[in-house]
Image (tube, rainbow, N blue to C red):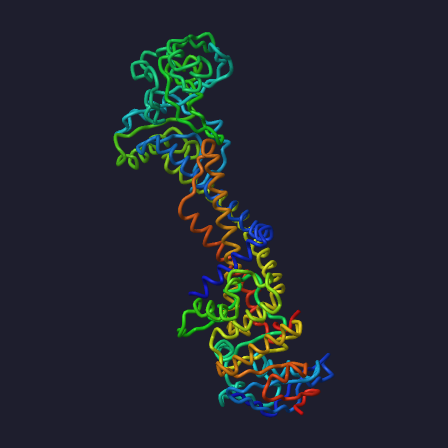
Amino acid sequence: MKNLVFIFKSAIEDFSRNKLRTFLTSLGILIGVFAVVVLIAMGLGLKKYISDQFEAMGKNTIFLVPGRILSGGGFSGSASSITGRFDSRDLDTLKRIKNVSKVGPLTLKSTKLIGLLKEDFADIMFSSEVLLEIMGFEMDTGRFFDKTDVTKRAKVVVVGSKIATDYYGSAEDAIGQKVTVDDVKFTIIGVTKSKGGGGMGGPDYDSYLYGPYTTGYIFNPDKKFFRLMVKTENESFVPQVKEDIKNEFLKRHKEEEFSVVEPTELLSAITSIFTVLNTILVAIAAISLVVGGIGIMNIMYVTVSDRIKEIGVRRALGARKSDILYQFLSEAILLSSIGGVLGLSLAYLAVFAVQNLFPAYIDLMSVLLALGISSAIGITFGVFPARKAANLEPVEAIRYE
Amino acid sequence: MIKLVDVSKEYVIDHEYTFYALKNASLEIKEKEFVSIMGPSGSGKSTLMHIVGLLDKPTTGKVYVDNKEISKISDDELSRLRNEFVGFVFQQFNLITKLTVLENVMLPTIYCRKDLSFDPRQRAVDILTSFGLEGKLNSRPNKLSGGQQQRVAIARALIMKPKLILADEPTGNLDSKTGHDIMMLLEKLNKEEKITIVLVTHEKDIAAYAKRVIKIMDGEVV
């Protein structure tokens, strides 16, 4: 063990005299570790972001979507989901099913929104009061529309926090303002708290307006919905309710015209796609680790050639082949570990820097992976030059000039 | 202590021409002796020294160390003998420039697998002090004069308390006064510490320090 301390000390001494060479040699590993760790962190963050979004919808939620969106765990074709629509009879069917506590249809209407500060196009989601629960909204100011509003076809809307600040200045200023949609005047009765997100092409729930679907019939005389949402009494009813919905809907629709899904099913489908994508990206990044390893091997061969005389002297003083092997091997491992640690630190900085834009995070697993892989690369690519050094004939080495 | 019997060393050059660095050389070095191996350059004296120092193996013939035939022992065992039994002093000093003087002297101790009977650092400091190098412990070897460097090399050769010191042209890179200082140091080690010394040189007056001179010419002991 005294040997090992000595070896590391002289290796570090060597590196500090060749700072530039050491840095350039470690650079390959640095970049590789950085890329792998950051990509894993982004993958993890994305997965967590998506599952958080679905989590908010609650566990006892069922969606009905036109067309077949899930078959065998993945998406297949989306053309039918655009043409297909549910109507109010479907909605009534749902209401009659046992253990269904709440039903919410969904339609979208785009409108020009004239606020105090700006005017632009915005989308209104028309649904029932169940939307509050399914989306997991919390109110900032005012209230969400309730069952009475739905029954009375009240001309009220709730706006997302971003709409409130962008168009009216603040949530307080937005309350009570009139919104005109195709000559129909709505009153803003509430502002939701920000849910964040929307950064990665996902829906930004802070930038919508929400109104009762019954009032939405004004713009939707056919009473068609692109999605139906169902809440059951509790989680245990979900499988039975799904089955019942399927059976009831098959009386009116063909099997391929609708899908009954739970958010968790969607979640696993989406995450499996992201996992595959992320794995491919990480694999590509890992190639740079191999390239970095080859760089280390190259420089270690140079080091061995530079130090043939030293190797001869050490052998004359009693170093065994294995002593020389370990000396050069530890230098290679040290070189790649320096790259690994630097890459990891840089990855931490990068993840920290994008934290507000992207929910990436580094877990213990990727730290261990980064350090493990970088030292494994040191061993793999260091062993050949080290063996060359160890197998030099002592007398040849000491004569070498 | 060391016996060479009919030792030859051949090098095949370009697969056809065979060069004999040593031809049937036989010699014996007894314990506590001070022997010079003398001959002109190219006479094979360095090859002879490398074989005596267990750095090289002969093509034919036998080498005995303490009556043990070395062709039968493993590479690790040879390393152990070089570490514990022999101390080398070279013409080029061969100090490791990135290590300090003290670390250079201690270097053989890190390759020793058994427990040492002494504290390596203390012994290194003691030897260097007795050589008048107490002020240079943490200097780099290349900051030292030739004579000082050679004394560091001798200190390194002594650290493991070897029975044998092999000195290959130890004065070759030194001026004659410093050279004679180094020779007197080796003479003293032989007399006072009873260390066997084998000296390789081509200089007559340097060889004269030894009690016995073995002459070598064209690979043959004459």
Q: Which of the 4 quarters of the picture holds residue A230?
A: top left
Q: Residue at x 42, y 12 (%)?
A: A218
Taking the image as shown, residue B163 lies to the left or right of residue B119, namely right
| The C terminus of chain B - image quarter | bottom right
Depth order, front residue of A6/A68:
A6
Q: Can see residue A7?
A: yes
Depth order, front residue of A221/A160:
A160
Q: In the displayed structure, would residue A367 be above or below residue A87? A: below
Depth order, front residue of A331/A186:
A331
Coordinates of residue A279 in the picture (x, y in percent)? 49, 46
Depth order, front residue of A48/B113:
B113
Q: Which of the 4 quarters of the picture holds residue A242?
A: top left
Q: Can see residue A270?
A: no
Q: Residue at x 58, y 86 (%)?
A: B35
Label tally? 0
Coordinates of residue A120 in the picture (x, y in percent)? 51, 15
Q: In the displayed structure, would residue A25 be above or below residue A211? A: below
Coordinates of residue B64 in the picture (x, y in percent)? 53, 88
Taking the image as shown, residue A164 lies to the left or right of residue A99, namely right
